[in-house]
Image (cartoon, helix red, strand yellow):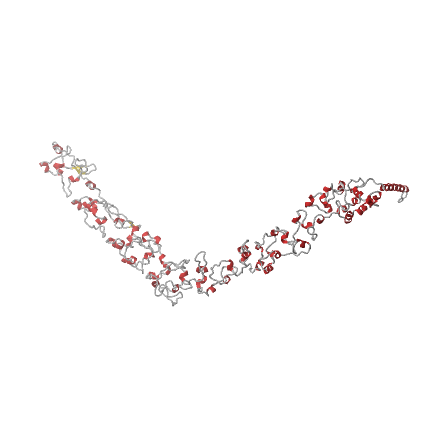
Amino acid sequence: MSPGRVDPKLLLVLLSVAAVGWLIWSDLERTSPGPISRTHAAVAELRGSDGCEACHGTGADGMPNACKACHDEVAHDFEAVEGLHGLLDAKLAGDCGACHVEHHGLSFPLVTERSFELAGARGPEDFDHAVLEFELVGRHAELGCAECHEHADDPLLVEGTHRFVGFTQDCASCHEDPHEGRMVRGCAECHGQERPFEEVASFEHETVSLEGAHAGLSCSECHPAEGIHSVIELGATSDVTERGCEDCHESEHSPDFLASAGGCATCHAASDGDFGGHAERMPIASHAASGFALEAPHADLECAACHARAPASFEERFPGRSADACAVCHEDPHAGEFAPRACLECHARDAFRPSLFDVRDHDQTAFPLLDSHRDADCVACHERAQDDAPAEFWNTPTDCAACHADAHIGKLVASEAIPDPRDCSVCHRPTHFADVLGGPDAPLDREGGRDDRLPFLHDRDTAFALRGEHRDAACSACHPEHLRANEAGRRFGFAQRLGNAQALPPAARPVERDFTNCASCHIDPHWGVFDAVRGGCASCHTEDSFAAAADDFEHARSGFELTGAHARAECASCHPAVASPPEGARPFARASEVFPGPKDDCSTCHADPHGGAFRNATSELARESGGCARCHTTESFHDLANPFDHLAWTGYPLSPEHAELACVACHVPKERVARYLGGDPAVGISTHGPVAGRSCEDCHLDPHAGQFEDSPRGSDCARCHLDEGGLGFDHDRDSRFALDETHAKLSCDACHLPWPMADGSQVVRYRPLGTTCEACHGPVGRGRGEGGGR
């Protein structure tokens, strides 16, 4: 068989099969497989064999079209592609019997679990309304099917009723419309499905944000039932005129201020909890609209610095102050002293200090500012009576003493030239206090010319006339200048404060400054020694020269009169020169510094040549006499005031022979003793040493070589030798050998012969000698002296 040609046999087979099929189908169409449901059976046109075509229709789309012919709502869904049937896929949409099974009897429901399974749900309870764009949210999700579909469970629908179809999501289809259909919005736009109907939970208040104070309001508080702003009236149109704050709230501000400030929202927000307390949002430009521009120094202030906080009234918080009325907010620091003048006449708007009132303005007052006053600070003259009191400007005294302390502390005396010592202008220029119109004795000003006014004269205008060296001294010698002025403006010191009193010994310190006392200014070089002298320093010194009258000084005023050798001595012998005396101090030392001790005691200055031998003399004369003057005078140490009584002073009588001797015969001269005065050695003085003793052997050698030392009668020379000379020896009394007539006629050396000593010398032998004849004469033929001694 050629390609493209159909086999006649195959074609015949196919036609046969088709004919058989048609016959079978035709037979089935005409024969009902079972009774139809009660719902369809209730329709007369569907009962019997003639009713098959009414449901099954004709052609391939017979049944879907037949169903649509009876069920208008289903037909609408298919046509509009909405609702459950309009959204089914094409296969299922063309097979109505797949979901709604028939011919199972009167009691078999047309909508079964399988119907919902084919629609994508396990049953009515699980059906997702979202596929129908009919969302069950909020309260609707909790409802049972029958609560919305009242015929859902009816076995037989009454004609004209529906089980599931024919419903819309229009609230009014189920609920009574309280607005009677006048609202242009759907119910859900305002009420939603989540909250109770009355809460209007989904309504978006577009014109005013419902927050802050607006959040707690009910709708009727802003939208009363009557009037153009009622909910009914506003909801009936989409062209809503937005209201401003002033439509609901009464404004405390003037219309002009609101217009210039840009309206309420410039400072107030709908989210605020109240109307007040939000002025901090006000822009600076808007504040200027109130008539008070926020410029320095107000620009940086917090609102509360000027405006009280709520709950104060609006008038209290915003009294409508003028920017020029400073006293409304600020306490008047002048306590009304300048009223009714405005603050801005003297003070800048942006800063209270410095004042705009300058020296040129001050010159228009009763006290023009001249010279040094022009540089003074205001508070230097305008003080406060108390720390919390305002400074005083009016009625400020103009005399010098009112502001300046008396630089002279009242020391200037009234005179014809200066009737009132407080009148500073007599002597001082207004240019500078230190410019004095005169000097100590010359009425000349600083430029060398004379001034018509009377100048300052020290002799006349003070209590201290300048004479001698005082007149030649510079002012600063008594009135030293200071780097800084004192509280009175004085730069030169007071004469009464001169002197280094602390450097003086207590006795020389002046208790109070007395200008008649030189020690008030000058250090007393005498340390107060002459304070008791009548006439003070002037009794010895003059103002021309301190040293000029030194030659006329009467030393007796010091308590030590110079007589004899003292008067002839050089001053330096007692008052040696000081190497580097301090300024103002005496150039020579004090005697008390060189010779410390009582000045009436010679030993304070002079060495005792007697070594203190007479200090403890016990005789009555010694007790009655005083010191060296008992024997010596100031004329010369060697000139005795009275003949020296050796017995009275020493207790040792001088025998005639002793009396004829020179003192040095018994008092051997000692070495010269050096006496130091002020560190320099003075002239030494010859002195005599003490005697060797009071016994004869202390001064004289024993001519007897100790022959009488062991004598029972002692070795006292006076037993034999008389002070006036000669011997007082009684041979019969004082020896063991009485002299008979023969022996008495003999000379002493007849019996007492020289005897040789070991050192080669000879000593007359007196004892021991024998007392028998044989002791001297011996046997015949023996020499004299042999045989022993006496």
Closer to the camera, 531 or 270? 270
Q: In the rendered view of the protein, which quadrant contains the C terminus?
A: top left
- Find residue 207 and report its horizontal and vertical position in percent: 65, 54
Up-down relation of residue 474 to residue 154 (above or below)? below
Q: Quick check: can you spot residue 450?
A: no
Residue at the left extreme, as displayed = 741
Up-down relation of residue 745 to residue 310 (above or below)? above
Up-down relation of residue 346 to residue 702 (above or below)? below
Q: In which quarter of the image is residue 48?
A: top right
Q: In this view, does 765 lie to the left or right of 353?
A: left
- Find residue 676 and report its horizontal and vertical position in percent: 29, 49
x 20%, y 36%: residue? 758
Q: Quick check: can you spot residue 141?
A: yes
Closer to the camera, 253 or 351? 253
Q: In the rendered view of the protein, which quadrant contains the N terminus?
A: top right
Q: In this view, does 160 lie to the left or right of 710?
A: right
